[in-house]
C-alpha cells in the first residue's frame, strides 16, 4: 500500500500534464501530397544556409548512416521520431519531399530557416508553432544524419 500512493500520484501527474499538442493531433493531420510539378520544385529548393550542394551516392554509406543514427538519437529524438510524427515531423522519406541541401540547411541553420524559409515556416505552423532548435552540429554530423534519413 505504501508503494501504491507514489505510483498513483505519478500517474495522476502524467495524466494531468497531458499536452494538447500531442502526437495524436499530429497523427490526425491530413497533409495533402503536392502535385508532381510542385514536388519537383520542392526537391530542387535548397533553403537558406551554408549547404549549396550535396552529392548523394546511389548506394547508402551504411557506416555514415550508423554514425548519423547515433547523432540523431542523442540530439534529435526529444522532438523527432524516426518513423512517426511527434513534436516535429518524422524524417522518414524526407528526401522524397525535400532536397538534401534543404534538409542539411534546416539542421545547421534552423533559426534563420524558421524565420525566412517558407517551407520551414509551413512546417512550423503544421507542428503547433514548435520551432526547430539549433543543436550546433557540424556539417559532417548533419551529413551523417542525412545519410541515416536515407535508410528510413
Image (spheres, rainbow, N blue to C red):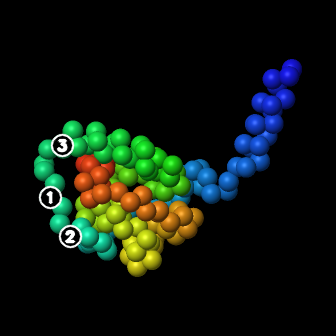
Residue at image point 72% right, 42% down: 14
Q: Position of residue 64 (x, y in %)?
A: 23, 43
> Which one is in front, 87 or 7?
7
> Which one is in front, 150 or 114?
114
Check the image and report above or below for 80 versus 122: above
Check the image and report above or below for 151 versus 122: above
According to the image, label 3 marks what residue? 61
N-terminal label among 3 and 1:
1
- Pointer 3: residues within 10 angstroms few (<14), some, or many (20+)? some
According to the image, label 1 marks what residue? 55
Q: Considering the numbered disc 3 on the image, is that residue within a helix, a strand or a loop?
A: loop
Residue at image point 86% right, 20% down: 1
Q: Position of residue 71 (x, y in %)?
A: 36, 46
Instruction: Report which quarter residue 110 is drawn in.
Output: bottom left
| Residue found farthest to the top | 1
Q: CA distance from mark 3 to mark 2?
A: 21 Å
| Residue found farthest to the bottom | 116
According to the image, label 2 marks what residue? 52
Amino acid at each position: 500500500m505504501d508503494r501504491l500512493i507514489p505510483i498513483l500520484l505519478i500517474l495522476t501527474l502524467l495524466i494531468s500534464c497531458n499536452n494538447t499538442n500531442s502526437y495524436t493531433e499530429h497523427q490526425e493531420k491530413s497533409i495533402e501530397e503536392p502535385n508532381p510539378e510542385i514536388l519537383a520544385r520542392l526537391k530542387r529548393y535548397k533553403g537558406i544556409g551554408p549547404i549549396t550542394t550535396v552529392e548523394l551516392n546511389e548506394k547508402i554509406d551504411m557506416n555514415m548512416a550508423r554514425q548519423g543514427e547515433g547523432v540523431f538519437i542523442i540530439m534529435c529524438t526529444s522532438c523527432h521520431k524516426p518513423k512517426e510524427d511527434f513534436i516535429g515531423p518524422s524524417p522518414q522519406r524526407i528526401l522524397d519531399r525535400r532536397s538534401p541541401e534543404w534538409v542539411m540547411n534546416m539542421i545547421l541553420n534552423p533559426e534563420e530557416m524558421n524565420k525566412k524559409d517558407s517551407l520551414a515556416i509551413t512546417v512550423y505552423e503544421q507542428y503547433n508553432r514548435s520551432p526547430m532548435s539549433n543543436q550546433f552540429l557540424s556539417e559532417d554530423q548533419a551529413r551523417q544524419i542525412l545519410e541515416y534519413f536515407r535508410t528510413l
